[in-house]
Image (cartoon, rainbow, N blue to C red):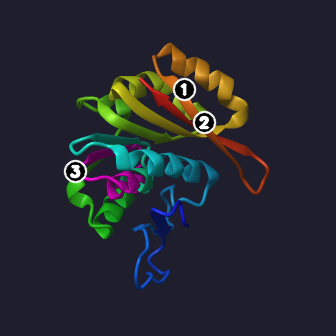
Amino acid sequence: IDVSPRLRIRPSFAPAPAKPARAELVIDPGQAFGTGSHASTALALEWVDALAPGLAPGARILDVGCGTGVLALAALRLSRGTRAVALDLDPLAAAACRENAARNALAARIDVFQGPLAALRAEPFALVVANLLRTELLPLVDGIARATARGGLAVLSGLLDSERDEVLRALARVGLAARGARTARDPGGLVWLSLLTQR
């Protein structure tokens, strides 16, 4: 999957180009969600591709509901001197994220844990990414806002465009202001939405 001229996601069984023209992540399909093929993941990756190169060295990234870790790992691959924290309730996802971090030589820059966002005790993050369905996201918006540094950015994907107004109202209540939106239609006709917000 060519996300942009900067970034490609490929499975390990696809041959690597002899002279890579872009940064790559190797992510194999498995039980954890997130290889970049679903519209919601692709939209989030587009935001990460646009934002990560501008992160300052020392900036910290948080991936909420990390699945394979593709969003956090893409942000690390496209930035210099950054670190990430990735969390998921699913032990299979946490394990897959750790494996993918090691496969892509990024394990030293990411901390992965299985557990809820409420268990996180850390300073706020410059960039937060969350690819979650509306029913999973809305209970977490207050925690996501608290985890986002003042002036920091949060990318929220996994939403349907028909849910936009409800989600924007919830985000405004916790101090996350919309700064941009991307949409994509999947093969079944659903229109997915990914929001860029700022605290």
Asked where in the image residue 154 lies, by quadrant, the reply is top left
Q: Residue at x 43, y 51 (%)?
A: 71
Q: Quick one: label 3 or label 1, which is nearer the N terminus?
A: 3
Residue at the limit of the structure toward the right, as seen here: 189
Residue at the limit of the structure toward the top, as seen here: 173
Magenta residues? Answer: 73-94
Q: Secondary structure at mark 2?
A: strand
Name the residue carrying label 1: 178
Name the residue carrying label 2: 181
Asked whether the beta carbons under mark 2 and mark 1 sit within 8 Å of each other, the answer is yes
- Residue 114, image x, y percentages: 33, 45
Crowding near pointer 1: few (<14 within 10 Å), some, many (20+)? some
Disc 3 versus disc 2: distance between alpha carbons?
A: 28 Å
Q: Residue at x 38, y 60 (%)?
A: 96
Name the residue carrying label 3: 81
| Amino acid type assigned to the residue bearing label 2 in the image | Ala
| Amino acid type assigned to the residue bearing label 3 in the image | Gly
Q: Secondary structure at mark 1?
A: strand
Give the total of numbered labels: 3
Residue 183 versus residue 159: which sits nearer the camera? Answer: 183
| Amino acid type assigned to the residue bearing label 1 in the image | Ala
Q: Residue at x 37, y 50 (%)?
A: 53
Q: Secondary structure at mark 3?
A: loop
- Residue 183, image x, y percentages: 66, 43
Q: Residue at x 57, y 33 (%)?
A: 180
Residue 180 versus residue 86: which sits nearer the camera? Answer: 180
Side of 87 relative to 121 (left or right): right
- Residue 166, image x, y percentages: 65, 22
Mark linked to residue 132: none
Asked whether the beta carbons under mark 3 and mark 2 sit within 8 Å of each other, the answer is no
Q: Quick one: label 3 or label 2, which is nearer the N terminus?
A: 3
